[in-house]
């Protein structure tokens, strides 16, 4: 069952529902901080995964831009309140990009790293998510990555590699020396996906695009859900937007709790969760090969550019 607790409803109701855990998914409309603070101080979530606002003036941030110090203090308060609600074998994944200030970039993960460290969380990977599309810059190199900071609460954390393996480059490769010489050296299920993930971002005519201005792709969260939780585990996203993390959780039989302040996004998220349950959800499969532009007619050098001086004509 998918349930939504709206602003008008009492928050206690949402909190109780989240704890009782009878839902497949629960969405809360409102500010995530008081919601988290009202949760009992006990381990509830297997995976906390989110992409917080970057303080860069997106539609949902209008009129709410904080100074750099205020932003970090706000994030710290949220992260500190999340800590006791994370299970001992659980993970917290903070997906962030760069804040841009008058053309100078401020990598948000560098700003926030100290908060997680002070709580004693262990950084397992700083995953680089790279994608092909974005703003074309004139005075610096165009930005084509964001990061996911993956922290665990303890050294005894859930990590399933097999469900997230990717095809090996040379599946038939054999050891060429040593005691295993001649034997197959790879894993039949594929290789470790590494800490650099190339996944198209949700823009233009991407199949997952909704009215939300900055969704992350389902595939990005899917890999985290599959690797860092067991079936039946609870995934929480305090800044859930269009509930992408919920789609990934439900696709793989995990349960989900999400908070979102903007009613329009909450409704989009609710619809996507319902579509996931009914099997109607549209998403880009995690193993779909990346688009290869070389075969496109748009890849040809246009005749207007064929001059002797630019080297296209000999
Ligand atoms: C970067 S977006 C997350 C997008 C999401 N990952 C997705 O795929 O749709 C951040 C979201 O946090 C919401 N938000 C901002 N402040 C919030 C708060 N205090 N509590 C809950 N949600 C908030 C914004 O409205 C926005 O939708």
Image (cartoon, grey):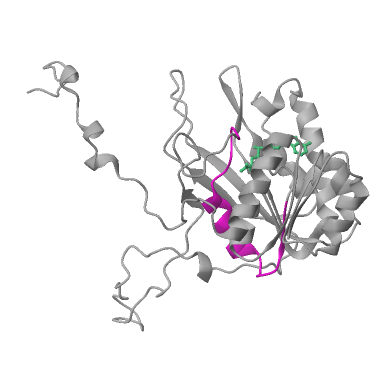
> Does residue 267 lie above or below 56 as drawn?
below
Could one spot residue 50 in this view of the protein?
A: no
Report the label total. 0
Magenta residues?
Answer: 212-236
| Quarter the N terminus occupies | bottom right
> Who is closer to the viewer here, 43 or 281?
281
Residue 213, image x, y percentages: 59, 32
Quick check: 72 left or right of 138?
right
Quadrant holding the C terminus: top left
* Residue that appears at 31% across and 66% down: 170
Where is 123 relative to 188, above or below? above
**Which residue corresponds to the image point at 41% horizontal and 38% vertical from the top-left?**
132
Q: Ligand 1 is located in which of the four quadrants? A: top right
Seen at 75% across and 60% down, the residue is 153
Task: Please indicate whether residue 185 sits to the left or right of residue 203 in the image.
Answer: left
Residue 77 is drawn in which quadrant? top right
């Amino acid at each position: 069952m998918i349930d939504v607790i709206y602003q008008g409803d009492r928050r206690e109701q949402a909190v109780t529902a989240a704890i009782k855990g009878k839902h497949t998914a629960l969405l809360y409309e409102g500010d995530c901080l008081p919601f988290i603070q009202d949760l009992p101080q006990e381990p509830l979530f297997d995976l906390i995964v989110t992409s917080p606002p970057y303080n860069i003036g997106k539609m949902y941030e209008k009129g709410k831009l904080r100074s750099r110090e205020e932003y970090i203090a706000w994030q710290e308060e949220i992260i500190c309140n999340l800590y006791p609600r994370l299970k001992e074998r659980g993970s917290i994944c903070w997906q962030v990009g760069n804040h841009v200030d008058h053309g100078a970039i401020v990598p948000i993960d560098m700003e926030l790293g100290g908060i997680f460290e002070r709580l004693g969380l262990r950084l397992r990977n700083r995953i680089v998510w790279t994608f092909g599309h974005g703003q074309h810059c004139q005075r610096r190199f165009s930005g084509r990555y964001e990061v996911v900071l993956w922290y665990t609460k303890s050294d005894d954390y859930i990590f399933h590699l097999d469900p997230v393996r990717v095809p090996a480059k040379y599946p038939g490769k054999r050891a060429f020396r040593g005691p295993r010489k001649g034997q197959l050296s790879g894993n039949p299920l594929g290789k470790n996906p590494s800490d650099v993930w190339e996944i198209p971002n949700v823009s233009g005519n991407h199949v997952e695009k909704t009215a939300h201005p900055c969704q992350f792709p389902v595939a990005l969260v899917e890999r985290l859900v599959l690797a860092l939780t067991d079936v039946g585990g609870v995934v929480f996203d305090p800044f859930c937007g269009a509930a992408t993390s919920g789609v990934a959780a439900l696709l793989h039989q995990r349960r989900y709790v999400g908070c979102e302040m903007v009613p329009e996004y909450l409704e989009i998220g609710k619809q996507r969760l319902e579509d996931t349950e009914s099997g109607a959800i549209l998403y880009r499969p995690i193993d779909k090969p990346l688009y290869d532009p070389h075969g496109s007619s748009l890849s040809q050098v246009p005749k207007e550019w064929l001059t002797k001086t630019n080297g296209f004509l000999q």
